Amino acid sequence: MAEDIIRTKTGIQGLDRALNGGIPSGNMVLVSGGAGTGKSTFCLEFIVNGANTFGEKGLYLSTEQNKDELYKQASLFNWNLLELEQKGLVKIIYYDPTSGDGFPQTFNDTVTQFKPKRIVVDSLTTLLDSLLISGISDEKGFSLVQIAETINPIPRTEQIVTKHVLYSLFKVLKAFKITTLLTTEMPENGKTLSADGVSEFVADGVIILQYVGVGSVDFRSMTVRKMRYTDHSKSTLAYAIEPSGISIKESEI
């Protein structure tokens, strides 16, 4: 791989080493894991480190926690999101997936005006479910689900509709050319790396967070399953969620 590639550092040192220096800038990376593995904490730290360590603006689109809840979660690690917002380094958008609205109409304008270097979508699972119900529109306001049905009016399975909407959503996000993390639930059966079973193929990268049992003890583990445009470690890394955030342990599992 070319060594002169521009990278976005996560600020999580062990992970940046595993990524040969960081995520290739502009990549869309799926952060996949079960409940309690730290997906939201991981993404918050990505945004906070970007602001505090690298002076990069970060946009956090949340579908499961409102601003106050995110402030509260961040404060557990002494991360002051409100202060970062007031400094103009972080912007948080809460999208209520039960509102019946489609993809936030202001999202594109916010990205254009705020000019973030990092974006988080937490969670893709919830956002996708909402879009399947209400639709995602193109720049002219037409529902992309309706457009797909007009082009190919044959009856479709839920999986096919999901795939169409997911590809449309990724096309919208990819056009920004901004390093983006998207969280998703990973099924317990392990047959797919995401709740929808499709996004792991569309995304540029996949980082898996999970619990691994070693004897009678459970450890949290992190694996870079996929990352386009760079070499990366294939090792499974042990990590812990500590008072300062995500900590990669030196030992591998």
Image (cartoon, grey):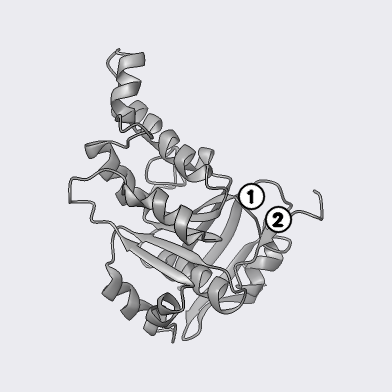
* Residue 159 in picture, x, y percent from top left: 34, 30
Of pointers 1 and 2, the one earlier in the residue sequence: 1
Q: Are marks 1 and 2 in contact (CB under 8 Å)?
A: yes
Q: In this view, does 193 lie above or below 67?
A: above
Q: Nearer the viewer, residue 175 or 25?
A: 175
Q: Nearer the viewer, residue 235 or 185?
A: 185
How many numbered callouts? Answer: 2
Residue at 34% from the left image edge and 78% from the top image edge:
71
Q: In which quarter of the image is residue 192?
A: top left
Q: Is residue 153 left or right of residue 169?
A: left
* Residue 168 in picture, x, y percent from top left: 42, 34
Q: What is the secondary structure assignment of the residue under circle 2? A: loop
Residue that mark 1 sits on: 227
Q: In this view, does 215 lie to the left or right of 142?
A: right
Q: In this view, does 13 lie to the left or right of 148?
A: right
Amino acid type assigned to the residue bearing label 2 in the image: His
Q: In this view, does 32 lie to the left or right of 140?
A: right
Q: How crowded is mark 1: few (under 14 residues within 10 Å), some or many (20 or more)?
A: many
Residue at 46% from the left image edge and 86% from the top image edge:
243
Q: What is the secondary structure assignment of the residue under circle 1? A: strand
- Looking at the image, can residue 175 be seen? yes
Q: Nearer the viewer, residue 242 or 213?
A: 242
Q: Quadrant of residue 132?
A: top left
Q: Mark on residue 232?
A: 2
- Looking at the image, can residue 184 be seen? no
Residue at 34% from the left image edge and 62% from the top image edge:
93
* Residue 56 in picture, x, y percent from top left: 57, 69
Gap in angstroms between the C-alphas marked 1 and 2: 7 Å
Quarter of the figure that contains the C terminus? bottom right
Residue at 41% from the left image edge and 63% from the top image edge:
60
Amino acid type assigned to the residue bearing label 1 in the image: Met
